[in-house]
């Protein structure tokens, strides 16, 4: 049962990431104002979109799910930091990034018994 819930969490994370990546790749003008607010040029949208797609694919594949989760954590942490840098403390993008990062690891934890065993062994 926990595996199914983990797959649902993981699928939700992947879908949300792919939606975000598609906006970055195919409609970067929609993000121009938001990106400028945190000090990024709209021309960086394509690169950011490719990074998000890569992370989502790595996370979706069982063999590379750990690497995907680690890279997603770093990417989302960077997003949190970028908003913090411009004074947006507890902003919607920060909270979204935090929740998405937690859901990434919760999904992996629930779908992969190796992660549960690793954490159980480390908590003793």
Image (spheres, grey):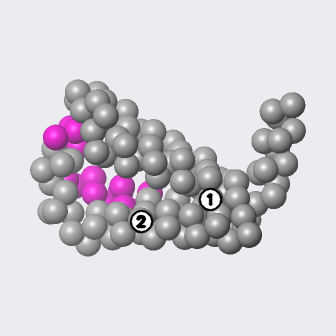
SS at mark 1? Answer: helix
> Does residue 49 appear left or right of residue 64 in this picture?
left
Q: Give the number of the disc on residue 46.
A: none
For the C terminus, the image quarter is top right
Please tell me which residue lies in front, 118 or 41: 118
Q: Considering only order in the chain, which callout, 2 or 1, is on the residue closer to the N terminus?
A: 2
Q: Is residue 61 visible?
A: no
Q: Position of residue 87 (x, y in %)?
A: 23, 27
User: How many numbered discs sit on the rendered protein?
Assistant: 2
Mark 1 vs mark 2, CA separation in Å: 14 Å
Residue 63 is one of the magenta-drawn residues? no
Q: Which residues are magenta?
A: 37-51
Asked whether the beta carbons under mark 1 and mark 2 sit within 8 Å of each other, the answer is no
Mark 1 sits on what residue?
107
Magenta residues, dominant SS class: helix
Mark 2 sits on what residue?
16
Image-quadrant location for residue 48: bottom left
- Determine the residue positioned at 62% across, 53% down: 106
Q: Position of residue 111 (x, y in %)?
A: 71, 63
Position above or below: 7 against 39? below
């Amino acid at each position: 049962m926990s595996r199914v819930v983990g797959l649902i969490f993981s699928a939700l994370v992947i879908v949300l990431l792919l939606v975000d990546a598609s906006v970055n790749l195919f409609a970067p003008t929609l993000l121009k104002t938001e990106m400028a607010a945190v000090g990024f040029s709209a021309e960086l949208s394509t690169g950011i979109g490719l990074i998000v797609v890569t992370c989502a694919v790595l996370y979706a594949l069982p063999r590379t799910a750990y690497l995907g989760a680690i890279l997603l954590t770093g990417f989302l942490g960077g997003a949190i930091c970028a908003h913090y840098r411009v004074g947006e403390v507890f902003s919607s993008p920060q909270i979204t990034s935090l929740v998405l990062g937690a859901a990434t690891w919760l999904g992996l934890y629930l779908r992969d018994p190796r992660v549960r065993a690793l954490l159980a062994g480390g908590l003793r």
